[in-house]
Amino acid sequence: MGSIMDRQGIKSFFSLSHVSAGFVAVLVGYTSSAVIIFQAAGAAGASAAEISSWLWALGIGMGLTSIGLSLYFRTPVLTAWSTPGAALLVTALSGVPINEAIGIFIFSSSLILLCGITGWFEKIMHHVPMPLAGAMLAGVLLQFGINLFNVMESSLLLVGMMLGVFILVKTLLPRYTIPIVLLVGSGLSFFQGQLNIDVLSWQLSTPVWVTPAFNLQSIIGVGVPLFIITMASQNVPGVAVLRANGYETPVSPLLTWTGFAGVVLAPFGGFSYNLAAITAAICMGNEAGQDPSKRYMASVWAGGFYLLTGLFGSTIASLFTAFPTALVMAIAGLALLSTIGNSLSAALADPGEREAALLTFLVTASGLNLLGISSAFWGLCIGLIAYYVQKSVSLSR
């Protein structure tokens, strides 16, 4: 009996839906924001070897945390770097010596670690109703669904073919929809000459230690904003993705380990680790497997691909840039389609909570950015205010 279960477990692990969801998640993550990492490292005055080390540290850190947390909790926990945080660093690190930049990274990750150990963040998130979590997730992902059709104007044949295959295969072979669509899109891109494989050259990344230096002005001016942006723009949506997909994984251990990874790997360029939102949703949707209890395997595969990106650094980054933008945007939109629909359905199901959820969705989808904090945070804040005001008024009647 045990050997049968082992064979079934191995077969399930190598399921094409798990492998493809993990690959698409990493593909979308790297192609959408890897260039910002190069810019942030350049702003800190990093050399070519140090930039390669940043990619090594980020890939190794995300890979180990994604694999370890997913296997331990049997939940699709996917971690990522803080893209808004990297965008902040592009401007904030200008003129800051790289040793002080490393000190900033350690400080910010230490605060995340503290939030995990104390459980402060988890206590706050317990007061976020499920409809609002679903609404925020739908708002975050909406643009990816819209971009699917925005790129169709300039790449009609490629995106139109991918959409047609998606509609057909979704009906006939739903488990293999995204892998087949990705294969068709890649093949067509190759024959159209849009798959730029000439940029590939294999070489291993080497970690480079940079001794940290701590400057109070830099810590306050950059470290605190980096922490706030990472928590508000990444970890809050990351928890919402888990909750919206029905996973009640305890948050504090996730923050503890991502914060710890940041402290350990910061000297090598690991500026931030946090819960993923958009890419995590890819590993939690129907395309990642029909059985929700087995979808953590998609995150494990994503972690494996992360490790490869760390080991081969800039080589893997160039691999992802070889895919045409239209293909990446189309595959992301198609992979997230069911998640967007399910999130909207859950958000608007209860008429009594519908208005607060709708406000959360609209503000999040608007792209509003105040004080350097993304719309997901403000959407949740406005939705929570509306929710609790309406709740208090209804109780007082």
Image (tube, rainbow, N blue to C red):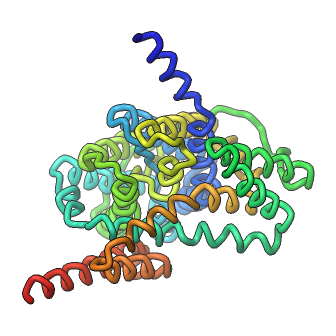
Quarter occupied by residue 372:
bottom left
Against 74, is 329 above or below?
A: below
Image spot of residue 233 (x, y percent):
40, 66
Residue in front for this viewpoint, 394 or 66: 394
Residue placed most toward the observer, 15 or 38: 15
Residue drawn at x 53%, y 41% is 289
Residue found at x 36% / y 72%: 377
Q: Is residue 49 visible?
A: no
Tell me the quarter of the image containing the N terminus: top left
Q: Is residue 67 left or right of residue 184?
A: left
**Where is residue 121, by image quadrant?**
bottom left
Q: Nearer the viewer, residue 61 or 292?
A: 292
Q: Is residue 116 visible?
A: yes
Kindly give the residue lying farthest to the left in the view shown: 396
Query: 379 left or right of 33?
Result: left
Residue at x 19% of width, y 85% of height: 389
Foreground residue among 211 and 272: 272
Circle count: 0
Residue 157 appears at what percent x and percent y?
Answer: 86, 63
Is residue 279 left or right of 213 when viewed as pictured? right
Residue furthest to the front in view is 172
Which quarter of the figure is the C terminus placed in? bottom left
Q: Residue at x 40, y 70 (%)?
A: 136
**Image spot of residue 26 (x, y percent):** 58, 47
- State the image coordinates of residue 196 (x, y, percent, origin top left): 83, 50
